[in-house]
Amino acid sequence: MRVLLEAARAQVEIELNDSATSQKIWEALPFEARVNTWGDEIYFGIPVHTEQEKPQEVVQEGDVAYWPPGKALCLFFGPTPISAPGEIRPYSPVTVVGRVAGDPGVLKNIGDGEKVRLRKIPSP
């Protein structure tokens, strides 16, 4: 399952994994949202409400995760304000639902309050 995230100055593909949470996100597409930033993370509310699935307290650069308390999708491209050296730590545990395909550093071009659009990329 591949998703395209489009913003004014950035575009990235996301490869969703085979989790139940990813499936719910896939079924909710397409949608638009306004971005919040927190360190080297962007996050935004999505029309999905589900419980934690294999919660993780530390993620990797390029991970895409669902944050249940905020009903939000989070994209990590570097440390957050609470990360220790050498780690990327979300505000609270998240469910990793996929990865950014390519360079996650492109996400630095998306500013706080900017609108993003997410849609399915059809299978070939």
Image (cartoon, rainbow, N blue to C red):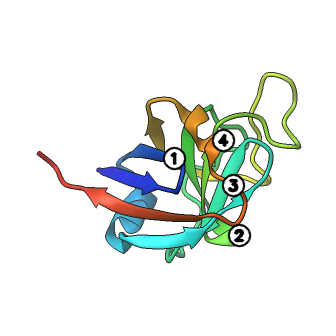
Q: Tell which circle, 4 or 1, labels the residue nearer the N-terminal end.
A: 1
Q: Which residue is mark 3?
A: 111
Q: Tell which circle, 1 or 3, labels the residue nearer the N-terminal end.
A: 1
Q: Which mark is residue 10?
A: 1
The answer for how far apart the CA atoms under marks 4 and 1 are is 9 Å
| Residue type for callout 3 | Gly
Q: Which residue is mark 4?
A: 108
Q: Which mark is residue 69?
A: 2
| Residue type for callout 4 | Lys
The answer for how far apart the CA atoms under marks 3 and 2 are is 22 Å
Viewer-side residue, 36 vs 95: 36
Rendered view: 66 above or below 123? below
Q: Choose mark 1 or mark 2, whichever is in front.
A: 1
Rendered view: 53 above or below 87? below
> In which quadrant is the C terminus drawn?
top left
x, y (%) of residue 15?
37, 43
Q: Tell which circle, 3 or 2, labels the residue nearer the N-terminal end.
A: 2
The answer for how far apart the CA atoms under marks 1 and 2 are is 27 Å
| Residue type for callout 1 | Ala
The answer for how far apart the CA atoms under marks 4 and 2 are is 24 Å
Q: In percent of the image, x 73 and y 43: which residue is there?
A: 57
